[in-house]
Amino acid sequence: MASFDIFDTIEQLRKTDEAFCVATVLRTADATSAKAGGKAAITKDGRILGHLGGGCVQRAVRSSAQQALASGTPQMIRVKPSEKVVNMADPDGIQTFKSGCPSGGTVDLLVEPYQHAPRLVIFGESLIAVALAGHGALAGFRVCLSDAPETEGDFQRFTLDSVQDLGVEPRDFVVVASQGQGDAAALAAALQTDAKRVSMVASHRKAETLVAKLVSQGLDPLRAARLKSPAGLNIHAIDPHEIAVSILAEIVLWRNSDKSKSESHDEKRA
C-alpha cells in the first residue's frame, strides 16, 4: 500500500476545478493527538484528507474551512477544552472552538483556502470577444470562450446548451460580446448563470430592450438586474483591443473591490 503524502494530495486537488483548504497544526499544548506541523486538505464537501487530531479538531476545521472558502481569506483558529473558553475569540484575536474531547489539549491551526482564479466567461465570436479572451488570459483569469471563434489560446470552450456545465460561481465574470449574432439567446444564457457580475457589449438602450423582453418571457427580474451595459470603463476606446482592455479593467476593478470588502468585513468581525 502506497504511503500517504499530503503534498501529492494537494497537487492532485489543484488540478481540479474545486476550491479546497489546507489546514496546518501550528502549536499544541497538553495531551492531544495532533502534532505541530501536521497538515490536511479539506475539500469543498468537508472531507479531511490527512491527520489533524481527534473529532473535536476535525469539526472545528470543517467549520473554519467553510468560512475561509466563503471569504477567500485564511483563518487562525484555536480548539481548546470547553471549560477554558470564555469568548469566541481569545485576547490575541484567534477564533476559538470548544472541545469536549477527553484529552483536554489545546490546538492552534491555520486554515488557508486555495481557490482557482475566477472564470471569465465570454459569449460571442466577435473581434471584441476574441481580444477579451486573450487579454483575460494574460491577466490570470480562467477564460471560457464560445466554441465558434477560431483563435489561438488554451481556452475552455462551451456552447449555449453546455454553459451550465461550466459551474459558474458568483465570483466569476460573464461578458456577452455577441454584437448582433444571437444577442437574445446569449444574454438569456448569461443571465441564467450564477455570476454576480454580468456585462454586455451593447448600448444601454439595446440591453434594456433585450432584458425587458426576456423578463416578459419569464426571466427572474433579480437575475436581470445584474446586467451592466455598456460593458467596460469609459476610456474612449475605439478598436476591439481597446474595448477589450476597458472591459477587463472594469472586471479587475470589480474583483479587487469585492476582495477589499471581504477583507474589511473580516477585520470588523475580528
Image (tube, grey):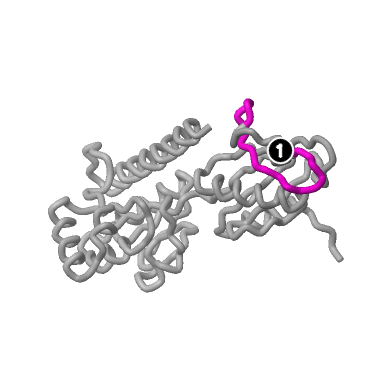
- Specify whether residue 154 is painted magenta: no
Q: Is residue 150 above or below residue 23?
A: below
Judge left or right: residue 12 versus residue 18: right
- What is the quadrant of residue 93 in the picture? top right
**Residue at point 71% right, 48% down?**
57
Residue sitting at the far top: 91
Please name whichever residue, 53 or 263, is drawn nearer the observer in this view of the structure: 53
> How far across and down, in percent of the image, does residue 208 sit?
16, 56
Residue sitting at the far front: 83
Q: Which residues are magenta?
A: 90-106
Judge left or right: residue 92 versus residue 33: left
* Residue 181 shows in the view: no
> How far across and down, in percent of the image, does residue 52 sit?
75, 48
Please name whichever residue, 129 or 264, is drawn nearer the observer in this view of the structure: 264
**Residue at point 49% right, 35% down?**
266
The quadrant the N terminus occupies is: bottom right
Q: Amino acid at mark 1?
A: Glu
**Residue at point 68% right, 54% down?**
11
Q: Is residue 67 above or below residue 185?
A: above
- What is the quadrant of residue 27 in the picture? top right
**Residue where numbered disc 1 is placed:** 83
Please name whichever residue, 121 or 61, is drawn nearer the observer in this view of the structure: 61
**Residue at point 56% right, 58% down?**
18
Circle 1: element type: helix
* Residue 231 shows in the view: yes
Q: Main secondary structure of the magenta part?
A: loop
- Specify whether residue 104 is painted magenta: yes
Q: Residues within 10 Å of mark 1 (few under 14, many from 20)?
A: few
